[in-house]
Image: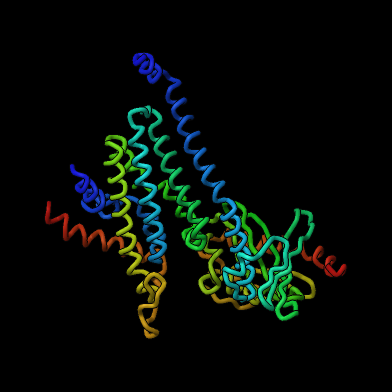
Amino acid sequence: MAQEKKLFRETAIYPIFFMVLITILFVGFLSFFYNMQKARIDDNQQILYYRQILEIFNDKITEVDFYQLQDDEVLANSDKYLIPYKLESEKGERNYFKVIDNGTVVGYCFDIIGAGLWGTMKAVVGFEPNLETLIDFNVYEQVETPGLGGRIAEPAEKLNLRSDLKGNTFLTDGEITNYKLISESSTSESNNEIRQITGATITSNSFLKMLNQEMSMIIPHFNEEMAKGE
Amino acid sequence: MTKKQIFMNSAFTENSIWKQVLGICSSLAVTNLLINSLVMGLGVIFAIGLASFFISLIRDYTPRSVRMMVQILIIAAFVIIVDIFLKAYYPTISKSLGPYVGLIITNCILMGRAEAFASKNPPVDSFIDGVGAGVGYTIVLLMIAFVRELFGQGTLFGARVLGDWWVNWSIMVMAPSAFFLLAMLIWIINTKFYNKKQ
């Protein structure tokens, strides 16, 4: 019996058998552990998503409020709340939110998707109600190079590209502003000059391209929805 | 070697960072805040301790031809557990650590201890060695983060320590400061302790 066992361990198939067994054991355990935590992780991601939208509009909302939120429900926080909508576009469904403060629409927030350097980049972008001014944006999902392109997710105080876009003119007579990247060390001389992220030209370009392409696609559909009274 | 000697050797005498200069990428990346460094350190202690234990446990059955694949698989499994745990219970810290938690898998310290110690020694000794290496790594992270957070932001673990008169040193918030601090740390420790021994 001992000799048979030894023989099996010496066969060419043994390393494969061993590797498969170990993989099944560990991956099985990981799957079990992940499934146990999945609901909690999804909740956290949802909370983070809403927080990023509310940050754009300088809203303050506590974690307790977030835990009370449910999908497709009005996200109420005293007098300030978001109403979620969905738009059908050529590239698929896009989420957007109407942001209300004291009964007044203070802006709209659009969820946009595009390609970064290494993979998909997702962001929420806030606009004033007439879409003429870009209030701010938050990149909530990206796989750019940490420390370089990854800085696209940093707050405006640390990121010149974001602070230059913050409060910038987005629509002029219905036309999207043609933003142009300039070196991070230079000074913007006009509204359309945006300081890029040093060492991450492709990410900076990708973000502006995503903003332009997505909003060009979304705005006509959004206007239609507005005309229909949502 | 006694258990205490294994721990002391792994954590201090043969410290992965100041003696072996391993795993420095993450030590430069996450040391801007003490809390990030502490969580990263705890993650590494957990992953390296348990990975070393399991690698040692199956060492007699592991074919040499696939041993490194097995080691990476086991290390990755424990690192992913840390990642899932942080995403579930500490989402803010998980987000601020970004990809660096996942990158523990490629941290040379873990593979180094697995190959140099766990694959040749009993499970409990390997566990102690792994935890020791993790503790040594965490101590270095905390030392660098202490200086960076204090001078870069005037805070320690997020609590303001220096008054409003303090002007933050921007360089300390940026990654290059960790290069200088780490180099100084290695220089001081080597001059003070190792050169004398030699």
From the viewer's perspective, tell me whether residue A157 is left or right of residue B47.
Answer: right
- Spot the residue most to the right: A228
The quarter in which the N terminus of chain B is drawn is: top left
Question: Can you tell which quarter of the image residue A133 is in?
Answer: bottom right
Q: Residue at x 35, y 74 (%)?
A: B151
Q: Residue A97: x percent and y percent?
A: 72, 67
Q: Residue A128: x percent and y percent?
A: 72, 76
Compared with B119, B4 (above or below) is below
Q: Residue at x 53, y 67 (%)?
A: A154
Q: Residue A172: x percent and y percent?
A: 76, 75
From the viewer's perspective, tell me whether residue A160 is left or right of residue B184.
Answer: right
Please tell me which residue lies in front, B38 or B98: B38
- Spot the residue most to the bottom: B165
Q: Residue A222: x percent and y percent?
A: 80, 66
Residue A199 seen in the current view: no
Disc count in the image? 0
Residue B78 seen in the current view: yes
Asked which colour scheme the image uses, the reply is rainbow
Compared with A151, B159 (above or below) is below
From the viewer's perspective, tell me whether residue B188 is left or right of residue A115.
Answer: left
Q: Residue at x 31, y 35 (%)?
A: B119
Question: Can you tell which quarter of the image residue A44 is in?
Answer: bottom right
